Image: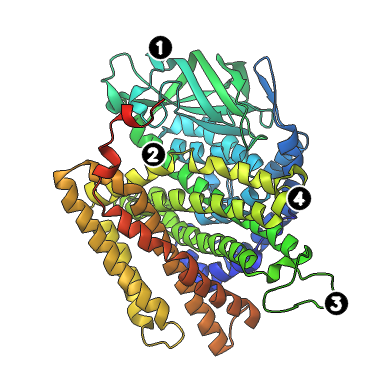
Amino acid sequence: MPVYKAPLRDMRFLINEVFDYPKHYAGLSNGKDADPDTVNSILDECARFCEEVLAPINLPGDAEGCHFDNGEVRTPRGFKDAYDQYVAGGWQGLSHPAEYGGQGLPMSMGLFKSEMMGTANWSFTMYPGLSLGAMNTIMQYAGPELLKVYMPPLVEGRWTGTMCLTEPQCGTDLGQVKTRAEPRADGTYALTGTKIFISAGEHDLAENIVHVVLARLPDAPAGTRGISLFVVPKFLPNADGTVGERNPVVCASIEHKMGIKASATAVLNFDSAVGHMIGEPNQGLEAMFTFMNTARIGTATQGVCHAELSFQGALAYAKDRRSMRALSGKKEPDEVADSIIHHADVRRMLLTQKAVAEGGRAMLYFAGQYADHMVNGILENDEAKYKRWDDKLGFLTPILKGFLTEMGLEAANHGMQVFGGHGYIAEHGMEQIARDARIATLYEGTTGIQALDLLGRKVLLQTRGKAVREFTGMIAKFAMEHMTHAKLRRYATDLAKLAAEWNVLTVRIMLAARKDRDVVSAASHHFLMYSGYVVMAYFWALQAAVASQKLAQENGSESAAFYKAKIATARFYFDHLLPRAKAHASAMTKPGKSLTKLAPEHFAFH
């Protein structure tokens, strides 16, 4: 199986030289403790934990899977011990307030941690990962008494959290939620209903599981405007914070899945389970989006994780596996054949993986700074600041989630392809990466839903194109600054054209949608993928610019070979991957009738 090695050199290049995180942290109200020495120590220790503890149980955990017996779930061998080490290391509360027992570091520190953990073992990472969204939602919307009860054990990792949205009859369309919440005399609520596809919904890792649940009050209006949000624990807390009696929320079964088999995906039955409302009545969907945005950025990270792990496995194999001779002549004349890394088509796949992993990482780390500012708005009780950065992050979120998971899946498939037939064999671990990656484009909103959210909601309805104009303004500024640089001119020229084209395409769709609403849904997938390719192009150009500067000034912290590899990968991206954007641009402006005109009964004839 792939031997995971945390990509610390690339991570530090982005953190220190591309995005200047030391300066960023110095300007945050909760960033004073995130000095370079502390950040480096955390990265090193997290890398050790991931390489030595989590990675070795990834393949065995997939082979064993979770065990279900009469409502109880047992995780694979090694998971409980690994989780205990995770809790003992204080990792869960890395980016949560000290008043609840956390370390109070910026949220982006949690992003760096999650990326390494997710690459080493995605199934394991889902257990504490779901808790992060629950913690953020409770922290923002719960009252002081609930905060005191739930936040300390969640931050410590003694308790874990989930999000309970999906029901048998509805996934994305949450207006159909049927779970009921009946008021009780003591101010709590009795929740009754069934939730499905609940990641980490039942397990043996922690002493309690806190479910954040969408449900309806008896007098709630129909649709999404009648949904409220509740905290429903597996065990009711005692007054002293210890675990008390069992709440009637029971795991009826766990799903048998294509991938992430070591992560328990539960069916949960609530039978008058005791819960507390958080947020305002009938405004639960708005509060749940705090959870969803956290989860969607986490899932975007999954795209980078699978691209990175598959790349590491494929690269090692391509250097070792020998087959035929390179077309340009023998590269290793003393061997029976050349290593397959010398074949251009294998390099195409490897460089695609590298471009996706490192370009996606740059996109995430940039968004991490937006998230830090957004969280600072919450911590400082500055609603305007929170809203400003939430809007900025909200525009990027569907691009990150939709585009990076699609590209991560492609990269995972390339990893199998590099291995040839051996990639299809379980013992090598490459097919597991592809199976695990497949879910990323589905949960937390499919790629199609992300596309509609981006184009229909974020770009057209909420900002009328302003979100695109603001982001392309940043791209255009970079292009103008580097237009006269001999080695960067081609990137600057391409980006300047793309920045203008992105705005033109947005306006064209906006005008066409006035006459035909189906234009939006017909164009949305292409708009999202186009947006993703352009955003990644910007961040590859930015990395090439920094690398060129470090080479010229000879003042970088990395080797010349490292910087030259960055420039070479940027060139590959612009030559071989960015041209895909042209096809998406062409397709999104075509009439929607070719998609909508065919009658359902004429799709097939038998």
N-terminal label among 1 and 2: 1
Percent of width and height locating residue 569: 55, 72
Q: Which residue is drawn at 68% across and 50% down?
A: 120
Which residue bears the numbered disc 3?
334
Mark 4 to mark 1 CA distance (whole Å): 53 Å
Amino acid of disc 2: Phe
Mark 3 to mark 1 CA distance (whole Å): 80 Å
Q: Are marks 3 and 1 in contact (CB under 8 Å)?
A: no
Q: Which residue is drawn at 27% across and 44% down?
A: 594
Amino acid of disc 1: Arg
Mark 2 burial class by Cα count in 10 Å: few <14, some 14-19, many 20+:
some
N-terminal label among 4 and 3: 4
N-terminal label among 4 and 1: 4
Which residue bears the numbered disc 4?
1
Amino acid of disc 4: Met
Q: Nearer the viewer, mark 3 or mark 1?
A: 3
Percent of width and height locating residue 436: 61, 42
Residue 184, numbered circle = 1
Q: In this view, does 227 lie above or below 17?
A: above
Mark 1 burial class by Cα count in 10 Å: few <14, some 14-19, many 20+:
few
Q: Is residue 542 above or below residue 464?
A: below
Q: In this view, does 210 lie above or below 12?
A: above
Q: Is residue 289 left or right of residue 343?
A: left
Viewer-proximal residue, 389 or 464? 464
Percent of width and height locating residue 553: 54, 89
Which residue bears the numbered disc 2?
289
